[in-house]
Image (cartoon, rainbow, N blue to C red):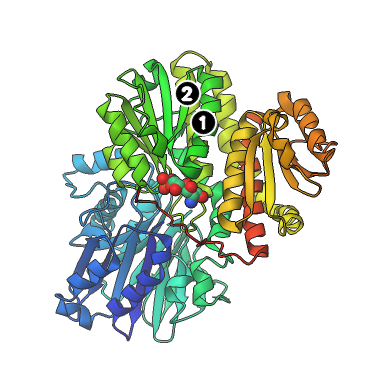
Amino acid sequence: MCGIIGYIGKDNSVKHLIEGLRALEYRGYDSAGVAFFDKENALMRVKAEGRLANVEAKLANVPEAAGSHCGIGHTRWATHGAPSDTNSHPHGTAALQIVHNGIIENHVELKAELVALGYTFESDTDTEIAAKLLDYYYKQESNAPDAISRLTGRLRGSYALGILFEVEPNKIYAVRKDSPLIIGIGKGENFIASDITAILRSTRDYYQLEEGELATVTADSIEISCNGKQIVKERKTALWDVEAAERGGYAHFMLKEIHEEPEAMIKTLRPRIKDMLPDFSDEKLDTSALAKVERLHIVACGTAMHAGLIARGLFESLARIPVEVEIASEFRYNDPIIDESDLVIIISQSGETADSLAALRLAKEKGAHTLAIVNVTGSSIAREADSVLYTLAGPEIAVASTKAYTVQTSLLSLLAVECAMLRGRINESAARELVTELYERAPKAVAEMIDRADEVKAIAEEIKTCEDLFFIGRGADYYLSSEGSLKLKEISYIHSEAYAAGELKHGTISLVVPGIPVIALCTVPSLIEKMGSNIREVTARGANAIAVSFKDVPEANKTVIIPTIDPRLAFLPAVTVLQLLAYYTSVARGCDVDKPRNLAKSVTVE
Ligand code: AGP
């Protein structure tokens, strides 16, 4: 997600801004920029698409940067508008510059108001809208605190804002809602930052800015006020080293990203739900295709393909539309039978997977309508698909995909409800019931499962020395097994197989030997008796059967009971169990959790 840094003090501000943005690079970004006062107190701005080095290259031709003592900086993880120089932050006017982390949900209505007031816009961002609205209020109030208060009174959504006003070259203002922001405490210098990582090289001391608080920061003072009254804040001290700070204090990015899942689900779903029903009207999505297509193809690789398997179950059960899920590297060489009556959904976290991109191009050649479900804004797959639905999980750094899968399946669940409604397969009240469970219960169920990580860690201790392992399930649980198996293999290097539980007796059960762990997914109520028989088949041959279910499974040696949730969405807390199991097993085996051998985060080669 985006990163914010601000510096004011005796030192050169631009040096600190660049240093801070470099420390925030781990958050993932696609453009960056700085705004600063030069020694004549002129407010200047330098920004660029791509890596931070591109900003530094531009700064090399701006000698005024060397004399600056006050500035703000930003790394952008694009949500509104593709990565570009123009869309990069800071945004502003002659009177002010701002940097923003978060999503302004009511940006459309605010922009219309500003256009009517004569404002023009150069970027596609919600941030520029916030900047111009602040400019409007500043012209009316002619003081920063009141103008900022009026701005935050109008913004809906999430924001952390760093603000410079041209007439106040020795002050930085900061305010936030939902997106975090801290105020770093130095000696003769002070900071604002998205997180402590950005300023650890200068200070470990900071104030945590809370919602509704305004920070006014100078080189020698930090004033924090709420409703116009100055308040006393608790001074905090970070205990992390720089390396740990980049992971937000988590031991690994993978664990951090699992913990981010509940928030990522809410962020991804919130803009597509109104009155607890699916509402994709803010997206450039041709929902008529969902209403009339005769077949749905979901094409992806690895974990993204496993997300497609889950989606298949929901589209078929809710919308009664036939769904084919295909591995992209197979799809593209099978001369698939598709035409304009088909909808092809490409799922990709990175949006750059070569096989998935090739599959997209083939589907378009054959006349199918294409929809991309992508996490990286402006990525190749996002740009080339007919329409795109972004997951808003923020950057996923660990090679093993976790939160991406969780938000992909969450978004596809919502899309399946939309599709079912468009095709008259589900009425509003049934749709609202499932969407409410998806939006209000599912993130909590995932969070509850994360809180019980120690239970899963104990199972990791049980299986860490095994060299072979089975995941078995039926229906959605079979699809879930595929993801559990991939996660375990790719980061713990234990060989495992996902098997349709009913298939074991047709050959593979010959591999079941005493002590082999068998993870039995049992989240489908109508199939739990059958799963009980399958578990008995393996325990009769000495297997150590570990069930994952909504209730105790007596046939298993032990059961991880997932938090209560509509069985159609049980895959969400259940996959969290499998992600944590893979994580703790990998740690127990001393593997490189975030960068497993032989693997890359995005497979941009065939
Ligand atoms: C997931 O844990 C793997 N790292 C891998 O299977 C990944 O899901 C696959 O390469 C697809 O990547 P994408 O989502 O970026 O297209």
Q: Which residue is mark 2?
A: 323
Q: Which residue is mark 1?
A: 311
* 93 left or right, relative to 31: left
Q: Which sits in the foreground, 486 or 178?
A: 486
In this rendering, the answer to whether 375 lies above or below 217 is above
Report crowding for label 1: few under 14, some 14 to 19, many 20 or more residues within 10 A (C-alpha).
many
Do we see residue 535 in this rendering? yes
Looking at the rendered structure, which numbered label has been put on residue 436? Answer: none
Snapshot quadrant of residue 501: top right
Snapshot quadrant of residue 7: bottom left
Q: Which sits in the foreground, 494 or 348?
A: 494
Spatial CA distance of label 2 from label 1 is: 9 Å
- Mark 2 in CB contact with mark 1 (< 8 angstroms): yes
User: Which residue lies at the image location 53% right of the left edge and 55% below the top edge?
Assistant: 257
Q: Secondary structure at mark 1?
A: helix
User: Which residue lies at the image location 41% right of the left edge and 71% below the top edge?
Assistant: 23
What percent of the width, then of the height, locates residue 41? 20, 76
Q: Which sits in the foreground, 32 or 253?
A: 253
* Extreme-top residue of the structure: 424
* 46 left or right, relative to 202: left
